[in-house]
Amino acid sequence: MNFIPSDFSKQLTILKQNFESQFRDILNQTSLAKSPPLLKEAIEYSLFPGKRVRAILALKSADHAKLAKDKAFKMAAAVECIHAYSLIHDDLPAMDNDTLRRGKPTSHIRFGEATAILAGDALQALAFEFVAFNSNACKMLAVASGASGLVGGQLLDMQGSAQDPAWLLKEIEQKKTGALMAAAVAMPFAAESHELTQQVYEWGENLGVLFQMADDILDETASTEDLGKSAGKDKEQNKITVISVYGLNAAKEKAENVAESLSQQAKTLFADDLFFVQIPYFILRRQQ
Ligand code: IPE
Ligand code: IPE
Ligand code: MG
Ligand code: MG
Ligand code: MG
């Protein structure tokens, strides 16, 4: 399959609108309501807007796991909070030192470094407030976000060079991006102690790897205007990416293969649900 059917794009828009329509309401039911106004402003600045890929994955996956809607929204909100925090910290001068994110100045440019760091800290705590109702989901999100997951991956990304670049690249992709995507799809299964939890987690992790491959390819090939974040930074900062390791053409071919394999696996894991069969291609072909 080498195109994204328009039905799929429509479905994605509806799912995104569905999430957005609830997100502010459920945020207002948390400790955020009692936050100092500046911190709340900085948190909301980074939560809106977003593509919501991870939230949508959690909501769709919850349908398959037969999880109640209110619980599914909390999980979706939680992954968006972790994601937004990770982007604030990723953009800091001590990390990727970026000035543009989601088409706006990055948090530290807009609010100063101290407030940006604290907004990230509070978003991370907020995520766990959302999933505290289920210990399986909570633990899965904690492990995916922490030292062996997202944060560990960010450390490896910052550290750079190694003896074996292909091995290191895989580690970086799986940890910094794969782990959170895995938690997004697998938390609803974990909450229901579903027998497919581990398989769904691994599928989600590879979807995250694909997401990072596409992100690296876009960094090289797309414009800052289209991305809403500064393009060409990876080469400038000598990052280990799928392009620095394999070159652009081989990187694109690799990403195609990963998408095809994920799409095939989705047929059995998600009972032929076209959403899951098509999402790998959406992630691969996205322009931003
Ligand atoms: C960007 O994620 C960071 C990566 C993990 C590559 P997204 O491209 O999902 O960012 P938003 O949420 O749409 O801004
Ligand atoms: C970031 O990867 C992954 C995170 C966990 C935040 P990148 O550094 O490539 O993300 P962008 O390109 O800045 O969005
Ligand atoms: Mg980075
Ligand atoms: Mg970055
Ligand atoms: Mg990038």
Image (tube, grey):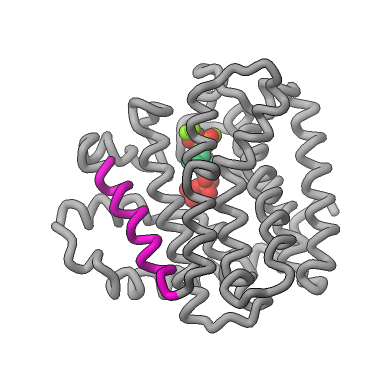
Q: Residue at x 18, y 61 (%)?
A: 35
Q: Is residue 120 magenta?
A: yes
In the picture, which quadrant includes the N terminus?
A: bottom right
* Residue found at x 41% / y 50%: 84
Q: Is 97 above or below relative to 101?
A: above
* 278 displayed left or right of 260: left
**Is residue 130 among the parts visible in the rendering?**
yes
Q: Is residue 225 visible?
A: no
Query: Which region is colored magenta?
Result: 117-133
Q: How many marks?
A: 0
Residue 22 falls within the magenta-colored stretch: no
Q: Main secondary structure of the magenta part?
A: helix
Residue at point 61%, 77% (across, down): 192
Q: Indicate whether 246 appears above or below 172.
A: above
Residue 76 lies left or right of residue 259; in this view the side is left
Q: Nearer the viewer, residue 148 or 186?
A: 148
Q: Is the C terminus in the top left, top right, bottom left or bottom right quadrant?
A: top right
Q: Position of residue 94 (x, y in %)?
A: 35, 26
Q: Is residue 258 left or right of residue 186?
A: right
Q: Is residue 156 above or below residue 115?
A: above
Expressed as whole percent of the image width and height from the top left, the position of residue 38 reads: 16, 52
